[in-house]
Amino acid sequence: MGLYNLAINTLSNSKIGQYLYGKSNILITNILKTGYIPQHVAFIMDGNRRFAKTQNLKVSQGHEAGSKSLLKIIETCYDLEIKHVTIYAFSIENFNRSEDEVENIFKILLEKLSFLIENQDYEYSKFIQIKIIGNKSLIPIETLTKFELIEKKSFENSNTDNNPPPLVLNVCFVYTSRDEISHSIGETLQDVIDQNLSIDQINSQIISNNFYFDPNTPSVDLLIRTSGHTRLSDFLIWQVNESNSKIEFLNMYWPDFNQFDYYKLLLKLGFNKLIQDIKNPKSIWELISNKQPKLIEIFEHFLKFNNYNDFEKINNQDWNVDLKKLQPPPPLVSILGEKS
Ligand SMILES: CC(C)=CCC/C(C)=C/CC/C(C)=C/COP(=O)(O)OP(=O)(O)O
Protein backbone atom coordinates (compact mmCIF):
# COMPACT_ATOMS: atom_id res chain seq x y z
CA MET A 1 0.00 0.00 0.00
CA GLY A 2 1.40 3.40 -0.98
CA LEU A 3 1.92 6.26 1.49
CA TYR A 4 -1.01 8.09 -0.03
CA ASN A 5 -3.43 5.19 0.54
CA LEU A 6 -2.02 4.61 4.03
CA ALA A 7 -2.71 8.27 4.89
CA ILE A 8 -6.24 8.03 3.46
CA ASN A 9 -6.94 4.81 5.39
CA THR A 10 -5.58 6.18 8.67
CA LEU A 11 -7.52 9.38 8.24
CA SER A 12 -10.75 7.63 7.37
CA ASN A 13 -10.50 5.41 10.46
CA SER A 14 -10.55 8.31 12.94
CA LYS A 15 -13.76 10.20 13.78
CA ILE A 16 -12.48 13.60 12.71
CA GLY A 17 -10.96 11.93 9.67
CA GLN A 18 -14.30 10.39 8.75
CA TYR A 19 -15.96 13.77 9.08
CA LEU A 20 -13.37 15.51 6.88
CA TYR A 21 -13.32 12.62 4.44
CA GLY A 22 -17.11 12.77 4.07
CA LYS A 23 -17.10 16.54 3.66
CA SER A 24 -14.31 16.49 1.08
CA ASN A 25 -16.17 13.83 -0.91
CA ILE A 26 -19.31 15.97 -0.92
CA LEU A 27 -17.29 19.02 -1.96
CA ILE A 28 -15.48 17.24 -4.80
CA THR A 29 -18.68 15.54 -5.98
CA ASN A 30 -20.45 18.90 -6.15
CA ILE A 31 -17.56 20.50 -8.02
CA LEU A 32 -17.43 17.63 -10.51
CA LYS A 33 -21.17 17.85 -11.07
CA THR A 34 -20.81 21.38 -12.40
CA GLY A 35 -18.93 19.87 -15.35
CA TYR A 36 -19.35 16.89 -17.64
CA ILE A 37 -20.60 13.72 -16.00
CA PRO A 38 -20.58 10.52 -18.07
CA GLN A 39 -23.80 8.54 -18.34
CA HIS A 40 -22.19 5.13 -18.39
CA VAL A 41 -18.93 3.95 -16.81
CA ALA A 42 -17.56 0.39 -16.98
CA PHE A 43 -14.94 -1.29 -14.81
CA ILE A 44 -12.54 -4.21 -15.25
CA MET A 45 -11.69 -4.82 -11.61
CA ASP A 46 -8.36 -6.52 -12.13
CA GLY A 47 -5.58 -7.36 -9.68
CA ASN A 48 -7.40 -8.78 -6.63
CA ARG A 49 -5.10 -11.79 -6.39
CA ARG A 50 -1.89 -9.84 -6.96
CA PHE A 51 -3.05 -7.37 -4.31
CA ALA A 52 -3.59 -10.30 -1.92
CA LYS A 53 -0.11 -11.60 -2.70
CA THR A 54 1.59 -8.27 -1.99
CA GLN A 55 -0.25 -8.06 1.35
CA ASN A 56 0.33 -11.71 2.33
CA LEU A 57 -3.38 -12.35 2.26
CA LYS A 58 -5.41 -15.28 0.97
CA VAL A 59 -6.87 -15.05 -2.54
CA SER A 60 -10.37 -14.90 -1.01
CA GLN A 61 -9.31 -11.85 1.04
CA GLY A 62 -8.11 -10.18 -2.17
CA HIS A 63 -11.56 -10.62 -3.71
CA GLU A 64 -13.19 -9.43 -0.49
CA ALA A 65 -11.03 -6.28 -0.56
CA GLY A 66 -11.94 -5.83 -4.25
CA SER A 67 -15.63 -6.03 -3.48
CA LYS A 68 -15.27 -3.32 -0.81
CA SER A 69 -13.59 -1.01 -3.33
CA LEU A 70 -16.43 -1.68 -5.71
CA LEU A 71 -19.13 -0.77 -3.20
CA LYS A 72 -17.42 2.58 -2.55
CA ILE A 73 -17.15 3.27 -6.28
CA ILE A 74 -20.84 2.42 -6.80
CA GLU A 75 -21.78 4.88 -4.05
CA THR A 76 -19.58 7.52 -5.68
CA CYS A 77 -21.25 6.89 -9.05
CA TYR A 78 -24.67 7.30 -7.46
CA ASP A 79 -23.65 10.53 -5.73
CA LEU A 80 -22.32 11.86 -9.04
CA GLU A 81 -25.62 10.92 -10.74
CA ILE A 82 -23.95 8.51 -13.14
CA LYS A 83 -26.88 6.42 -14.31
CA HIS A 84 -25.26 3.25 -15.64
CA VAL A 85 -22.36 1.29 -14.19
CA THR A 86 -21.11 -1.96 -15.71
CA ILE A 87 -18.72 -4.35 -13.97
CA TYR A 88 -16.84 -7.39 -15.28
CA ALA A 89 -17.63 -9.64 -12.34
CA PHE A 90 -16.92 -13.05 -13.87
CA SER A 91 -15.75 -14.05 -17.35
CA ILE A 92 -16.27 -17.42 -19.01
CA GLU A 93 -12.48 -17.94 -18.72
CA ASN A 94 -12.74 -17.48 -14.95
CA PHE A 95 -14.25 -21.01 -14.81
CA ASN A 96 -10.66 -22.21 -15.37
CA ARG A 97 -9.80 -21.18 -11.81
CA SER A 98 -9.91 -23.66 -8.93
CA GLU A 99 -13.35 -24.81 -7.78
CA ASP A 100 -12.72 -23.19 -4.41
CA GLU A 101 -11.95 -19.80 -5.93
CA VAL A 102 -14.94 -19.90 -8.28
CA GLU A 103 -17.26 -20.80 -5.40
CA ASN A 104 -15.75 -18.03 -3.32
CA ILE A 105 -16.27 -15.41 -6.03
CA PHE A 106 -19.92 -16.51 -6.43
CA LYS A 107 -20.36 -16.31 -2.65
CA ILE A 108 -18.87 -12.80 -2.41
CA LEU A 109 -20.93 -11.59 -5.35
CA LEU A 110 -24.17 -12.91 -3.88
CA GLU A 111 -23.33 -11.52 -0.44
CA LYS A 112 -22.42 -8.05 -1.67
CA LEU A 113 -25.28 -7.75 -4.13
CA SER A 114 -27.74 -8.83 -1.41
CA PHE A 115 -26.18 -6.27 0.92
CA LEU A 116 -26.63 -3.59 -1.75
CA ILE A 117 -30.35 -4.09 -2.03
CA GLU A 118 -31.57 -5.83 1.12
CA ASN A 119 -30.01 -3.87 3.94
CA GLN A 120 -32.67 -1.43 5.11
CA ASP A 121 -30.08 0.72 6.90
CA TYR A 122 -27.99 1.10 3.78
CA GLU A 123 -28.90 4.46 2.30
CA TYR A 124 -28.27 3.38 -1.31
CA SER A 125 -30.35 0.20 -1.22
CA LYS A 126 -33.45 1.80 -2.72
CA PHE A 127 -31.59 3.44 -5.55
CA ILE A 128 -29.81 0.58 -7.26
CA GLN A 129 -31.26 -1.60 -9.98
CA ILE A 130 -29.22 -4.73 -10.65
CA LYS A 131 -29.13 -6.45 -14.04
CA ILE A 132 -27.29 -9.71 -14.59
CA ILE A 133 -25.69 -9.59 -18.02
CA GLY A 134 -24.24 -12.71 -19.60
CA ASN A 135 -24.76 -16.28 -20.59
CA LYS A 136 -27.23 -17.53 -18.00
CA SER A 137 -27.03 -21.09 -19.35
CA LEU A 138 -23.50 -21.29 -17.87
CA ILE A 139 -24.58 -20.33 -14.34
CA PRO A 140 -25.38 -23.23 -11.98
CA ILE A 141 -29.15 -23.26 -11.53
CA GLU A 142 -29.23 -22.65 -7.75
CA THR A 143 -26.87 -19.67 -8.14
CA LEU A 144 -28.90 -18.31 -11.06
CA THR A 145 -32.11 -18.52 -9.02
CA LYS A 146 -30.50 -16.45 -6.23
CA PHE A 147 -29.20 -13.86 -8.71
CA GLU A 148 -32.59 -13.58 -10.38
CA LEU A 149 -34.22 -13.02 -7.02
CA ILE A 150 -31.75 -10.21 -6.29
CA GLU A 151 -32.45 -8.70 -9.71
CA LYS A 152 -36.21 -8.81 -9.10
CA LYS A 153 -35.93 -7.38 -5.59
CA SER A 154 -33.68 -4.53 -6.70
CA PHE A 155 -36.20 -3.65 -9.37
CA GLU A 156 -39.08 -3.62 -6.88
CA ASN A 157 -37.07 -1.57 -4.33
CA SER A 158 -36.04 1.12 -6.75
CA ASN A 159 -39.17 1.27 -8.83
CA THR A 160 -41.48 3.26 -6.57
CA ASP A 161 -42.93 6.68 -7.36
CA ASN A 162 -41.11 8.35 -4.46
CA ASN A 163 -37.64 7.31 -5.56
CA PRO A 164 -35.39 9.30 -7.86
CA PRO A 165 -34.26 7.41 -11.00
CA PRO A 166 -32.05 4.50 -9.97
CA LEU A 167 -28.48 3.71 -10.85
CA VAL A 168 -28.48 0.65 -13.13
CA LEU A 169 -25.72 -1.75 -12.12
CA ASN A 170 -24.98 -4.17 -14.98
CA VAL A 171 -23.21 -7.13 -13.44
CA CYS A 172 -21.46 -8.97 -16.26
CA PHE A 173 -21.60 -12.41 -14.80
CA VAL A 174 -20.50 -15.26 -16.89
CA TYR A 175 -19.80 -12.94 -19.75
CA THR A 176 -17.41 -12.43 -22.63
CA SER A 177 -17.90 -10.16 -25.61
CA ARG A 178 -17.33 -12.89 -28.16
CA ASP A 179 -19.98 -15.03 -26.49
CA GLU A 180 -22.35 -12.04 -26.50
CA ILE A 181 -21.74 -11.48 -30.23
CA SER A 182 -22.28 -15.20 -31.00
CA HIS A 183 -25.49 -15.11 -28.97
CA SER A 184 -26.63 -12.05 -30.89
CA ILE A 185 -25.94 -13.67 -34.26
CA GLY A 186 -28.20 -16.58 -33.26
CA GLU A 187 -30.97 -14.21 -32.11
CA THR A 188 -30.58 -12.10 -35.25
CA LEU A 189 -30.95 -15.14 -37.51
CA GLN A 190 -34.09 -15.99 -35.58
CA ASP A 191 -35.36 -12.42 -36.24
CA VAL A 192 -34.61 -12.91 -39.93
CA ILE A 193 -36.76 -16.05 -39.94
CA ASP A 194 -39.56 -14.71 -37.69
CA GLN A 195 -39.86 -11.32 -39.35
CA ASN A 196 -39.13 -12.50 -42.87
CA LEU A 197 -36.17 -10.12 -43.18
CA SER A 198 -33.71 -10.23 -46.04
CA ILE A 199 -30.00 -10.70 -45.26
CA ASP A 200 -29.12 -7.14 -46.32
CA GLN A 201 -31.47 -5.81 -43.65
CA ILE A 202 -29.07 -7.06 -40.98
CA ASN A 203 -27.13 -4.11 -39.61
CA SER A 204 -25.10 -3.23 -36.53
CA GLN A 205 -28.19 -1.85 -34.80
CA ILE A 206 -30.00 -5.20 -35.02
CA ILE A 207 -26.88 -7.01 -33.80
CA SER A 208 -26.47 -4.77 -30.75
CA ASN A 209 -30.20 -4.88 -29.95
CA ASN A 210 -29.77 -8.62 -29.52
CA PHE A 211 -26.93 -8.36 -27.01
CA TYR A 212 -27.35 -9.46 -23.40
CA PHE A 213 -27.54 -5.78 -22.44
CA ASP A 214 -30.83 -3.92 -22.37
CA PRO A 215 -30.98 -2.15 -25.79
CA ASN A 216 -31.79 1.11 -23.99
CA THR A 217 -28.42 1.13 -22.24
CA PRO A 218 -26.54 4.30 -23.23
CA SER A 219 -23.15 3.87 -24.85
CA VAL A 220 -20.11 3.45 -22.62
CA ASP A 221 -18.39 6.81 -22.05
CA LEU A 222 -15.53 5.58 -19.93
CA LEU A 223 -13.99 2.16 -19.34
CA ILE A 224 -11.49 1.78 -16.50
CA ARG A 225 -9.15 -1.21 -16.09
CA THR A 226 -6.85 -1.55 -13.13
CA SER A 227 -3.73 -3.69 -12.58
CA GLY A 228 -1.49 -2.53 -15.41
CA HIS A 229 -2.76 -4.80 -18.19
CA THR A 230 -3.52 -2.82 -21.33
CA ARG A 231 -6.07 -5.06 -23.00
CA LEU A 232 -9.84 -5.54 -22.89
CA SER A 233 -9.86 -9.29 -22.13
CA ASP A 234 -13.03 -9.88 -24.16
CA PHE A 235 -15.07 -7.25 -22.34
CA LEU A 236 -17.40 -4.81 -24.18
CA ILE A 237 -15.29 -5.00 -27.34
CA TRP A 238 -18.25 -4.00 -29.55
CA GLN A 239 -19.60 -1.36 -27.17
CA VAL A 240 -16.35 0.60 -26.75
CA ASN A 241 -16.05 0.94 -30.51
CA GLU A 242 -19.66 2.00 -30.93
CA SER A 243 -19.14 5.23 -29.08
CA ASN A 244 -15.42 5.93 -29.08
CA SER A 245 -15.34 5.32 -25.36
CA LYS A 246 -12.40 6.66 -23.41
CA ILE A 247 -10.37 3.77 -22.02
CA GLU A 248 -8.15 4.25 -18.99
CA PHE A 249 -5.60 1.63 -17.93
CA LEU A 250 -4.34 2.18 -14.42
CA ASN A 251 -1.17 0.95 -12.84
CA MET A 252 -2.70 -0.13 -9.54
CA TYR A 253 -4.55 -3.16 -8.25
CA TRP A 254 -8.32 -2.92 -8.01
CA PRO A 255 -8.53 -3.01 -4.17
CA ASP A 256 -6.23 0.05 -4.11
CA PHE A 257 -8.48 2.01 -6.47
CA ASN A 258 -10.44 4.61 -4.50
CA GLN A 259 -12.75 7.57 -5.06
CA PHE A 260 -9.88 10.01 -5.39
CA ASP A 261 -8.34 8.01 -8.24
CA TYR A 262 -11.76 7.96 -9.82
CA TYR A 263 -12.28 11.72 -9.41
CA LYS A 264 -9.00 12.36 -11.24
CA LEU A 265 -10.13 10.24 -14.20
CA LEU A 266 -13.48 12.03 -14.32
CA LEU A 267 -11.76 15.43 -14.29
CA LYS A 268 -9.52 14.31 -17.13
CA LEU A 269 -12.50 12.97 -19.09
CA GLY A 270 -14.39 16.24 -18.57
CA PHE A 271 -11.42 18.29 -19.74
CA ASN A 272 -10.94 16.17 -22.89
CA LYS A 273 -14.66 16.36 -23.60
CA LEU A 274 -14.62 20.12 -23.30
CA ILE A 275 -11.75 20.40 -25.80
CA GLN A 276 -13.54 18.05 -28.22
CA ASP A 277 -16.85 19.83 -27.86
CA ILE A 278 -15.53 23.26 -28.73
CA LYS A 279 -17.05 23.43 -32.18
CA ASN A 280 -17.56 27.16 -31.96
CA PRO A 281 -14.88 28.63 -29.71
CA LYS A 282 -16.13 32.16 -30.15
CA SER A 283 -19.55 31.52 -28.64
CA ILE A 284 -18.05 29.65 -25.72
CA TRP A 285 -15.51 32.42 -25.19
CA GLU A 286 -18.23 35.06 -25.19
CA LEU A 287 -20.40 33.02 -22.88
CA ILE A 288 -17.60 32.65 -20.36
CA SER A 289 -16.36 36.24 -20.62
CA ASN A 290 -19.85 37.63 -19.97
CA LYS A 291 -20.38 35.43 -16.96
CA GLN A 292 -16.89 34.89 -15.58
CA PRO A 293 -14.35 37.54 -16.70
CA LYS A 294 -11.92 36.37 -14.03
CA LEU A 295 -12.03 32.87 -15.45
CA ILE A 296 -10.90 34.20 -18.85
CA GLU A 297 -7.90 35.81 -17.20
CA ILE A 298 -6.97 32.52 -15.54
CA PHE A 299 -7.56 30.59 -18.76
CA GLU A 300 -5.37 33.00 -20.78
CA HIS A 301 -2.62 32.60 -18.26
CA PHE A 302 -3.03 28.83 -18.34
CA LEU A 303 -2.86 28.63 -22.14
CA LYS A 304 0.22 30.82 -22.30
CA PHE A 305 1.83 28.92 -19.47
CA ASN A 306 1.34 25.70 -21.43
CA ASN A 307 2.83 27.20 -24.62
CA TYR A 308 -0.40 27.30 -26.52
CA ASN A 309 1.03 29.29 -29.41
CA ASP A 310 -2.26 29.27 -31.25
CA PHE A 311 -3.78 31.16 -28.39
CA GLU A 312 -2.85 34.56 -29.80
CA LYS A 313 -4.56 33.60 -33.02
CA ILE A 314 -7.71 32.61 -31.18
CA ASN A 315 -7.66 35.75 -29.13
CA ASN A 316 -7.22 37.91 -32.22
CA GLN A 317 -10.66 36.88 -33.37
CA ASP A 318 -9.42 34.44 -35.98
CA TRP A 319 -12.11 31.92 -35.26
CA ASN A 320 -11.42 29.55 -38.12
CA VAL A 321 -9.07 27.56 -35.97
CA ASP A 322 -8.55 23.94 -36.95
CA LEU A 323 -8.80 22.29 -33.57
CA LYS A 324 -6.92 19.24 -34.83
CA LYS A 325 -3.86 21.42 -35.35
CA LEU A 326 -3.87 22.65 -31.76
CA GLN A 327 -1.35 21.13 -29.43
CA PRO A 328 -2.63 18.25 -27.32
CA PRO A 329 -4.32 19.20 -24.06
CA PRO A 330 -1.98 19.76 -21.12
CA PRO A 331 -1.56 16.87 -18.67
CA LEU A 332 -4.17 16.63 -15.97
CA VAL A 333 -3.18 18.43 -12.82
CA SER A 334 -5.23 16.99 -10.02
CA ILE A 335 -6.69 19.08 -7.27
CA LEU A 336 -4.35 17.19 -4.97
CA GLY A 337 -1.42 18.73 -6.82
CA GLU A 338 -0.33 15.51 -8.52
CA LYS A 339 0.24 15.09 -12.22
CA SER A 340 -1.16 11.96 -13.84
C1 LIG B 1 -20.70 -7.01 -7.18
C2 LIG B 1 -19.47 -7.31 -6.44
C3 LIG B 1 -19.43 -6.88 -5.05
C4 LIG B 1 -18.40 -7.88 -7.06
C5 LIG B 1 -17.25 -8.40 -6.36
C6 LIG B 1 -15.99 -8.10 -7.06
C7 LIG B 1 -15.19 -9.33 -7.25
C8 LIG B 1 -14.90 -10.21 -6.12
C9 LIG B 1 -14.78 -9.61 -8.47
C10 LIG B 1 -13.97 -10.76 -8.78
C11 LIG B 1 -13.70 -10.73 -10.24
C12 LIG B 1 -12.32 -10.93 -10.61
C13 LIG B 1 -12.08 -12.21 -11.30
C14 LIG B 1 -11.38 -9.96 -10.42
C15 LIG B 1 -10.07 -9.89 -11.05
O1 LIG B 1 -8.97 -10.03 -10.19
P1 LIG B 1 -8.03 -11.29 -10.44
O2 LIG B 1 -8.53 -12.40 -9.58
O3 LIG B 1 -7.98 -11.62 -11.90
O4 LIG B 1 -6.64 -10.79 -9.94
P2 LIG B 1 -5.23 -10.97 -10.67
O5 LIG B 1 -5.31 -10.22 -11.96
O6 LIG B 1 -4.27 -10.36 -9.70
O7 LIG B 1 -5.02 -12.45 -10.88
Image (spheres, helix red, strand yellow):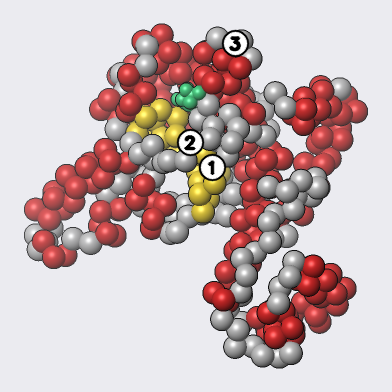
Sequence order check, earlier mark of 2 and 3: 3
Label 1 – label 3 distance at C-alpha: 25 Å
The reply to whether residue 316 is in sight is yes
The residue that disc 3 covers is 57
In the displayed structure, 134 sits above or below 120; it is: below
In the displayed structure, 98 sits above or below 25; it is: above
Q: Quadrant of residue 140?
A: top left
**Front residue (pair 36, 93):** 93
Q: Residue 249 got which mark?
A: 1
Rendering coords of residue 46 (x, y %): 50, 30
In the displayed structure, 16 sits above or below 290; it is: above
Amino acid under disc 2: His
Near mark 3 (Cα within 10 A), the count class, few <14, some 14-19 or many ≥20, is: few
Label 1 – label 2 distance at C-alpha: 7 Å
Amino acid under disc 1: Phe
Rendering coords of residue 45 (x, y %): 52, 32
| Mark toward the viewer: 2 or 3 | 2
The reply to whether residue 133 is in sight is no
Residue, far bottom: 317
Amino acid under disc 3: Leu
Q: What kind of element bears circle 3?
A: loop
